[in-house]
Image (spheres, rainbow, N blue to C red):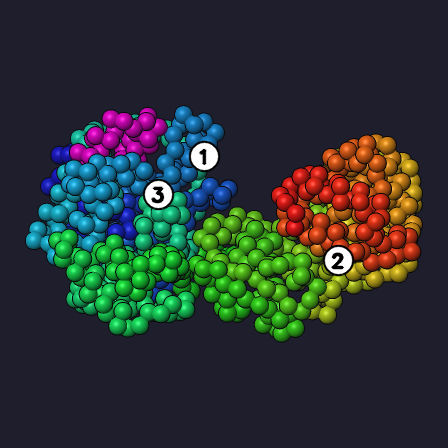
Amino acid sequence: MAALGEERAHLLGIRHHGPGSAALLCEALTAIDPACVLVEGPPEGDRLIPHMAGNGLRPPVAMLLYAADDPKDAIFMPFAEFSPEWQAIQWALRRNRPVRFFDWPAAVSIAVRKAAREDPEVGEQDAPEQAATVSALDLLAGSAGYEDGEAFWNALIEQHRSRGDSALAVFASIATAMTEARAAEERTSDSAELRCNAWREAHMRHNLRAALKEIPGAIAVVTGAWHIGGLRLNTKAADDRALIKDLPRVKVDATWIPWTDSRLSAFSGYAAGVISPGWYRHLWSLYSQATAYTVEQFASVWQSRTAFLLREQGFLAPTASAIEATRLALALAAMRELPMPGLAEMREASLAVMCEGNPVPLAILERKLYIGEEVGEIGDGVPQNPLARDLALWQKKTRLKPQDLDQDIKLDLRSEAGLLKSTLLHRLSLLNVPWGKLSDTQSSRGTFRETWVLRWQPEYSVALAEALVYGVTIDQAAGNAALQRARETNSVTELASLIQDTLVADLPETATACIDLLQTAAVSSSDLTDLMQSVAPLAGVLRYGTARRVPEETLRSLILSISVEINAGVRLASRSLDEEAATARICAMEVFDDALALFGDDVLTATWRHELGRIVEDHQATSGIAGLCLRRLHDRRDWDFDKVAVEFVRHTNSGDPKNAGQFLEAFLRGGAEVILQDPALLQLLDIWLCELDDTSFTDALPLLRRSFSDLESGARRRILAKLRQPLPHTETVLPRTGDDPAAAAFDAALPLLYQILGVGGRP
């Protein structure tokens, strides 16, 4: 360590995002009064540090560092107001002291991670704080009599307000303990982890030597406590340079982005995350100089917040209960010989007093209270990538604030404000930034109203960085991204969906270009299933006619030409399909049939219905497709019941059980409610079953099981119960009576039917 200037370099080991560590650090920095502060973090972030001095950033925020040629390769460095790194930088900026990051460069970190994906032997470092730290803390916790490392660290550092020792003495103890724990842990660590640590800490020592050489006076080094042992190694500068000389690098860009409490939480998968950011933020209010809480006031404020949020959720939580919960939390802390109540004491007090022992109310508050719902803000003077800046302008214009909770909004597209919000959300979806998701999409499309569920995720900032290749504004990038996708596909269905997406995103020029591409693709397409699926989004978008700028005539002409082609070829194209192709065709035909009803062209619809009839009568038609066609003709009342019954019997008695099964399965599509509400359909099934002889009935059992397998047991019971009741009279089928042979046959077969359908007992 002598080579690193031990007398001038003060190593301060902290826990990332620990409020107690931050408070200790501020005391230590004041005592040391260093000439320079080095903070764990990538040096590419140095140019972003000056923006932390003003009001342009409101934590939680993060530095986003990403590969310039592939923004998906990115790393984040989050900050909360209670993060020790944030407080160290603030301390230095307020005193005009030099402050810089001294970790390994993001250019190397990203390149090593990329190489690790391609060659696992290279090793990978995913987060500033190693997972091994948890094991080391657990080791110390066991020795100290604590359940786990989290409780141990919280009790000694984060929630230990009154200390007899100075901050520097505490940091010395932390360094000693973590160095010993690390030595024990490394004896069982894998080689990849050790190699990454060696690279990182060689960079740290190299940067520390440079700072000691450049700046006279004391230097404060703020780093994760895990790395203290590595920085204390008495290595030669030449050896460190040789170790990091040939590491790969990529070009990196850096910017500020908003962060969220949920992403600071360890539950998000963030390796350096904390259990309860909301609690830590409240804990910081006790330590910060801006608020002079007593321990009693600190506890009462937390319990008051708990009571308020419980009342918001409809639970009884009077002020008297909050007072009693505060007293209980203080009493628990005293019994456990703690200087102040911790999160465990606060939670137990709330559970006992305000929730009467019921854990459900507190579980409901987990997201809002214990994790928190803060989303950071980036001010106008802080550099962001152009798309992020344009999105910030859109958010102000539409008054849509990013939140870290699901937020339901209902938009009236007839209003300017509603249409503007909808346009923004649709454009972001084209950029793979699903800030908002349409709720009940099919019912929302084609009306004057949309219902969205909004939730902001920090990863969307990465997606915006990726989208920079398409443009520097939201509308430009969304249009170019959609156009590129359109040029890269030959699928008529995908092109139709892109037309729909660009029209609802108010990108008419892009939509026109996609229409031209679709017309070209449709002419050369021989995939009738693809053509059928393309009509639905085109027909659906016409319902936006009075709320959006939609080229109605062009779309109608396009739908008409595609539909004419479908009608002309559907019968011949329905022959000799394998099971997979038949299943896809059946789904496409359902969608196309519904789309034609929406489109409203009587001649086109009549032609389609005529073709459905020809398919049913075609002996070479695939059985499943014939079953769907017959069912649609029955549902639309295009055929009388006698004709439907004749074709049903012909197909189900074809002599081929597999074909009969496929026909029956397709004919019964739509669920139990459709069957229950259609007496004629139910009667047709009933009479068909009753007229089967013993051998035919046995052969039909697998068909029945397959056809009814998707129905719930309750639906099966209701069908059987309805079959036992007298069915409506039709001219084709006479009603059953008590001495009807068919009724007797049905009663005899009923127990077996219950067994086949998986229904135990009689209804």
Confirm whether residue 583 shows in the render: no
Residue 114 marker: 1
On screen, residue 165 versus residue 653, left or right, reads left
Tell me the kind of residue under disc 2.
Answer: Gln
Alpha carbon distance from label 1 to label 3:
19 Å
Q: Which residue is found at the position 54% from the left and 66% from the top? A: 409
x, y percent for residue 634 = 85, 53
Q: Quarter holding the N terminus? A: top left
Label 2 or label 3, whichever comes before in sequence order: 3
Q: In which quarter of the image is residue 260?
A: bottom left
Alpha carbon distance from label 1 to label 2:
59 Å
Mark nearer the viewer, 1 or 3: 3
x, y percent for residue 128 = 32, 42
Within the magenta stretch, is there residue 180? yes
The correct choice, above or below, for 11 with respect to 733 in the image is: above
Q: Which residue is found at the position 25% from the left and 51% from the top? A: 18
Identify the element where label 1 is drawn.
Answer: helix
x, y percent for residue 748 = 76, 41
On screen, residue 361 versus residue 412, left or right, reads left
Q: Which secondary structure type mostly characterizes the magenta part of the structure? A: helix
Mark nearer the viewer, 1 or 2: 2
Crowding around mark 2 (Cα neighbors within 10 Å: few <14, some 14 to 19, many 20+) is few
Tell me the kind of residue under disc 1.
Answer: Lys
Q: Give the range drawn in magenta.
A: 179-202
Label 1 or label 3, whichever comes before in sequence order: 1
Which residue carries the number 3 mark?
271
Which residue carries the number 2 mark?
677
Confirm whether residue 119 shows in the render: yes
On screen, residue 535 versus residue 209, left or right, reads right
